[in-house]
Amino acid sequence: MSSDVVVSLQNLHKSFGSNHVLRGIDLEVTRGEVVCIIGPSGSGKSTLLRCVNMLETPSSGTITVLGRELTDIDCDINEARSKIGMVFQSFNLFPHMTALENVSVSQRKVLKRNAKEAQEISRSLLARVGLQDKENSYPAQLSGGQQQRVAIARALAMNPDVMLFDEATSALDPELVGDVLAVMQALAQEGMTMLVVTHEMGFAKNVADRVVFMDAGVIVEQGSPQQVIGAPREERTQSFLSSVLNH
Amino acid sequence: MALSKRKKAMYMRYAMYVVSIAFLIAVILFIDWERLGNAMFRWNIVKEQFPDILTKAAKNTVVFTVLGFAGGLSFGLLFALMRLSSIRAYRWFAATYIEIFRGIPLLVTLLILGFGIPIATGWKWPNPYLQGAIPLSLVASAYMAETIRAGIEAVPKGQMEAARSLGMSYTRAMTTIIIPQALRIIVPPLTNEFVLLIKDTSLISVLGVTAATKDLARFGRDGVNQTANATPLIVAGLVYLAMTLPLTQLVAWMERKTKAMSR
């Protein structure tokens, strides 16, 4: 396997009881690539993303991240996860910690950085997402957009090799979406490998290197944004896009 | 003339007040206050209770309560985590323990562990405080385990997911992320458990305590035997109230505060 492959999914299946959510997914993401996953709700795109860092254990198939097979029982999952950044739809900031502590805590507890070093890194990360003046604010004192940017900084603090975004802007008020997307776009331009589940077609069109359309647990179509969003070949892709773009 | 519903309700309310006040006046008039005061509240006996009721009896009650609470909290946390474990044997064990100790009256547990086990095995309790406090904490832990479990389950699932996504182990995520948040949720109910424990320590007196380990209730009962008067019990009750009332007020205040915060 080429060393440039960061994420590799092979014949991935996932069922919740009798509900067969993923029905054989094969996907590779190479270093520096930004892949957007789009599709109707219930198509399995969030489950797919959550499988990449094993928040969901797949029913069958293999997941390989940075050459490490996460589905192997001998794999140290905590170590592997520390290299995979995850950003959630509902932010999931730690409400009992300030913004600075949110960004520092995993550096201290997982990477074992000392307090001073962790704080310095956290400050520069908060500055990078435009929140240098909010380091002492608690999540409840921040807007949704600010919370999500702290969450991105928190994930970046682990120096991840790949970032996963699970509908990162879906819970935001419309006027706050732009700030978060700008941070994500900047990350993409810096060469971060990103796997993004999104409903923001504009972001997919402008930022993605590749767009993957999923429906009913399978990848229906993938290719460049121009190809998939601009000129979809599959009928399911066409009907999904016309329902999202013409509302 | 038919009364409207609201008018009827209004007259009913007045009638209730009149009846209540009449009843109160009747009680005040017909009770033999002097006799009652002689039997239950004699100043000279009240004075005799001090300072021992505070320095010895109340101190012992506090010692039993604190030991029981500390033990109950540690074991309660352990059983709560076992209830939430992915290992079925742990869940099963904790659930059985909780059901057993919540289902048997504290008095019976105290007698079995305090007397029954020593008689059956020849083993002796090394310390009279532990003889009372350990059964107390075993029962308290069953109740606290359920409180703590509810607190942990009230922390949104996304918190654990976020912590694990950052590479934290389950244990690390529990100690740094989940339990600190759960503690905030369970402080009011745990304070209530503390109040219940203060009162439950009164049952420990069935274990033939020595003069040094008498708790408040036993002190009151012994006082009744010595003076042939109920005053010592009344004083003991007032000392209990002096301990529990501030705590129940604190809980009420905390609950108002969390309500205001979640608004």
Image: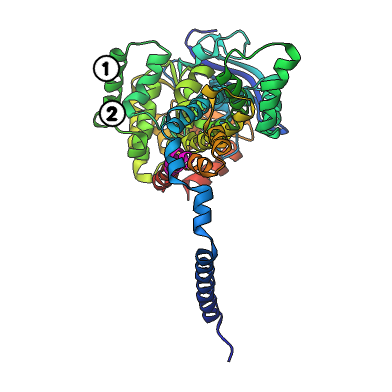
On screen, residue A57 above or below A166: above
Q: Nearer the viewer, residue B235 or A187?
A: B235
Residue B240 in the magenta stretch? The answer is yes
In the image, farthest residue toward the bottom: B1
**Residue at 37% over, 25% down:** A102
Q: Are marks 2 and 1 on the same chain?
A: yes
Residue bounds of the magenta highlight: B239-249
Q: Does the image show residue A159?
A: no
Percent coordinates x, y for residue A7 in the rendering: 52, 17
* Residue A47, horizontal then vertical, whole percent: 58, 29
- Residue A185, given in percent of the width and then of the height, sits at 35, 29
Picture quarter containing residue A202?
top left
Residue A148 relative to residue B100: left or right: left
Near-viewer residue (A240 or B91): B91
Q: Residue at x 51, y 14 (%)?
A: A78
Q: Main secondary structure of the magenta part?
A: helix
- Report the quarter where the N terminus of chain A lies: top right
Q: Residue furthest left?
A: A133
Residue A135: assigned label? 2
Image point 64% across, 22% down: which residue? B86
Checking the image for residue A120, the label placed there is: 1
Name the kind of residue labelled 1 in the image.
Answer: Glu
Q: How many marks?
A: 2
- Decide: is A58 above or below A37: above
Q: Quick one: B190 or A63, which is closer to the camera? A: B190
Mark before the other along the chain sequence, 2 or 1: 1
